[in-house]
């Protein structure tokens, strides 16, 4: 079947779109292009010819949402009655993930046996265990493992992933991890936002002040040098601001130094103890802060005013038995709420559909709010909402095609994404096709 013809857009006379004329429906989702969504998570429906990704060629599989009319991106015409939605962002894994490290920890990592996060950390486990193995691993070993994990995330519908270093804690290994991330950026069909997280923990034998000095005087100048030479393009800087790790003063020094060399601030805050991290992030102009289980009322107000995204991580609260982040209060006060998987050895979750489900059940978000938080708001948390996170004219055309007449099933069916997702599309090209694709859905 040939490609559908172009047609003029009734709302934008200077533009043409692919597809057949349809009944009058909104051409753009409600709101300013690239704008994050708040409470309610407005979701608009569109007609089949309303979108044209950058480059002028349509991802034809989008027509599946509306019942045919163009050839499918994979070469067939899919059945009618399915749903299309923006590719999810994982601001990690939008966000917050460390898939590029070596070695699994022992399943459960002690947390399933009842030990607290800081008990494991102080006993030399947790991050320090993974650091030891990551330092020993070769770059090729790290890349092969990293590639496999990214492919699993992509099969679960993620098209933009934040990937962090942070399991080196010395310059040599942090750079090794960042090179692996850079290689994946160049070679894989998935969007990656890279984050330097050398302040993930205090290295053994150093104080927090000594570690901060090393990062500011040695790590960050090297990153600036590599950026200027074109060898490496790191996007964000992260610090684990926590009692017993980096205090507020050390965190401020590191984040400001990173900002001074052009990195976006996107850091761990107020996870296990109230640290006033949210207030600090607002002061420094942070793009996003993750966790926030222990954020204060003043911190919520501060990040709402500053338009700093709150990246909430339902898997972390679930696995570590923490109190749930105050998603409803944040949404009601105008905070830009995003969701992330926090993929790491302690929260081994590749699936953003499962993250959205947990957000609805445990944090009392609506499905519309969860979808917005996992797409456009997650893209905002990475500074990429102008190109990612929604289906809009001029964006790059990252889509997920699901085998259901209602998109809500992707969230409602806990763990059902493996059979619901038929296609994942990045920049208008199919990068994953489910082997079950074409089986009629009863959903």
Image (cartoon, grey):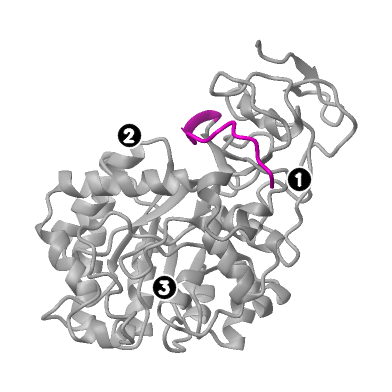
Residue 286 makes an appearance in the image: no
Say whether residue 273 is left or right of residue 356: left
**Region rendered in magenta:** 428-443
Say whether residue 127 is left or right of residue 47: left
Q: Secondary structure at mark 1?
A: loop
Above-or-below relation of 392 to 135: above
Residue nearest the viewer, comparing 70 with 392: 70
Disc 3: which residue:
268
- The image position of residue 274, as x and y in percent, is 47, 89
Q: CA distance from mark 2 to mark 1?
A: 32 Å
Disc 2: which residue:
187
Mark 3 or mark 1, which has the lower sequence index?
A: 1
Disc 1: which residue:
29
Residue 68 makes an appearance in the image: yes
Above-or-below relation of 23 to 227: above
Main SS type for the magenta part?
loop
């Amino acid at each position: 079947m040939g490609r559908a013809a172009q047609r003029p857009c009734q709302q934008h006379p200077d533009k043409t779109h692919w597809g057949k004329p349809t009944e009058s429906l909104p051409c753009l989702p409600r709101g300013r292009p690239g704008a994050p969504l708040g409470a309610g998570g407005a979701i608009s429906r569109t007609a089949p010819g309303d979108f044209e990704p950058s480059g002028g060629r349509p991802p034809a599989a989008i027509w599946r949402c509306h019942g045919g009319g163009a050839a499918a991106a994979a070469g067939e015409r899919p059945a009618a009655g399915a749903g299309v939605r923006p590719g999810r962002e994982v601001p990690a894994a939008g966000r917050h993930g460390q898939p590029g490290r070596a070695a699994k920890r022992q399943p459960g990592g002690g947390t399933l046996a009842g030990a607290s996060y800081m008990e494991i950390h102080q006993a030399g486990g947790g991050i320090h265990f993974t650091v030891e193995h990551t330092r020993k691993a070769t770059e090729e070993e790290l890349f092969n493992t990293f590639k496999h994990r990214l492919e699993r995330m992509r099969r679960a519908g993620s098209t933009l992933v934040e990937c962090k270093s942070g399991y080196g804690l010395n310059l040599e290994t942090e750079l090794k991890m960042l090179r692996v991330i850079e290689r994946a950026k160049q070679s894989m069909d998935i969007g990656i936002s890279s984050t330097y997280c050398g302040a993930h923990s205090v290295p053994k034998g150093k104080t927090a002040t000594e570690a901060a000095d090393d990062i500011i005087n040695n790590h960050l100048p090297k990153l600036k040098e590599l950026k200027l030479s074109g060898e490496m393009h790191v996007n964000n800087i992260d610090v684990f601001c926590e009692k017993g790790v980096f205090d507020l003063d050390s965190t401020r020094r590191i984040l400001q130094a990173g900002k001074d060399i052009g990195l976006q601030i996107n850091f761990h805050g107020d996870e296990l103890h109230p640290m006033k991290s949210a207030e600090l992030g607002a002061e420094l102009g942070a793009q996003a802060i993750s966790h926030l289980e222990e954020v204060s009322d003043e911190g919520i107000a501060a990040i709402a005013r500053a338009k700093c995204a709150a990246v909430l991580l339902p898997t972390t609260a679930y696995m570590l038995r923490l109190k749930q982040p105050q998603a409803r209060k944040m949404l009601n006060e105008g905070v830009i709420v995003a969701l992330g998987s926090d993929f790491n050895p302690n929260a081994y979750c590749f699936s953003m559909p499962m993250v959205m489900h947990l957000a609805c059940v445990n944090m009392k978000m609506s499905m519309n709010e969860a979808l917005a938080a996992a797409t456009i708001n997650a893209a905002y948390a990475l500074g990429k909402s102008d190109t990612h996170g929604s289906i809009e004219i001029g964006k790059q055309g990252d889509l997920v095609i699901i085998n259901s007449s209602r998109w809500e099933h992707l969230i409602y069916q806990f763990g059902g994404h493996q059979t619901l997702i038929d296609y994942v599309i990045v920049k208008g090209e199919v990068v994953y096709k489910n082997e079950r694709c074409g089986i009629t859905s009863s959903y």
